[in-house]
Amino acid sequence: MRRLVLDTNVVVSALLFDGPPAALVRLVVEGELVSLTSPSLLAELQRVLVSKFQYPPSLAELAVTEWRALSEHVEPTVTLAVVAQDPSDNRVLECAVSAHAEAIVSGDKHLLALKSFRGIPILSPHAFLAQRR
């Protein structure tokens, strides 16, 4: 079973739309994939749902609680400063490295530009699903 970090943008897309991000979350729900998350990624999910998508705080908290329950919780053991353009992207890398993830799935251009980090491939949702077949 593949262990991966789904970037916040993938989780949000899965909540709002159908498509590859939603397919990935369904695979997590079905136990086909293991989602890895951290306190900072969960906090970002809460913040993005409320500030960018006007979720009521209680509904955002429910979404975060559900995602936490579906995911393996990781306390990062490293602090990284790899992506200067968007420091929050470093939290994704920290989670993946600390949890020995097999992949990072993101729609973020800064992370995707890296292609991999410390041997961990960084793929779009579509690319991850395509190589999984």
Image: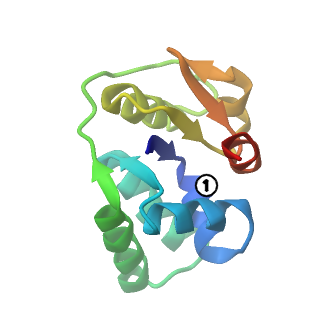
**In the depicted view, which residue is nearer to us: 128 or 79?**
128
40 to the left or right of 132:
left
Residue at 74% x, 67% y: name it.
Answer: 19
**In the depicted view, which residue is nearer to us: 44 or 127?**
127
**In the depicted view, which residue is nearer to us: 51 or 38?**
38
Residue 9: x, y in percent?
Answer: 61, 55
Q: What amino acid is labelled 1 in the image? A: Asn
State the image quarter where residue 74 is shown. top left
Residue at 68% x, 37% y: name it.
Answer: 123
State the image quarter where residue 97 is shown. top left
Query: Considering only vertical position in the picture, is 30 above or below 73?
Result: below
Query: Considering only vertical position in the picture, is 133 above or below 67?
Result: above
Residue at 50% x, 38% y: name it.
Answer: 88
**Under tag 1, what secondary structure?**
helix
131 to the left or right of 4:
right
Query: Considering only vertical position in the picture, is 120 above or below 24?
Result: above
Residue at 35% x, 73% y: name it.
Answer: 66
Furthest residue toward front:
133
Residue 48: x, y in percent?
Answer: 52, 63
Query: Which residue is the site of mark 1?
Result: 9
Residue 78: x, y in percent?
Answer: 30, 21
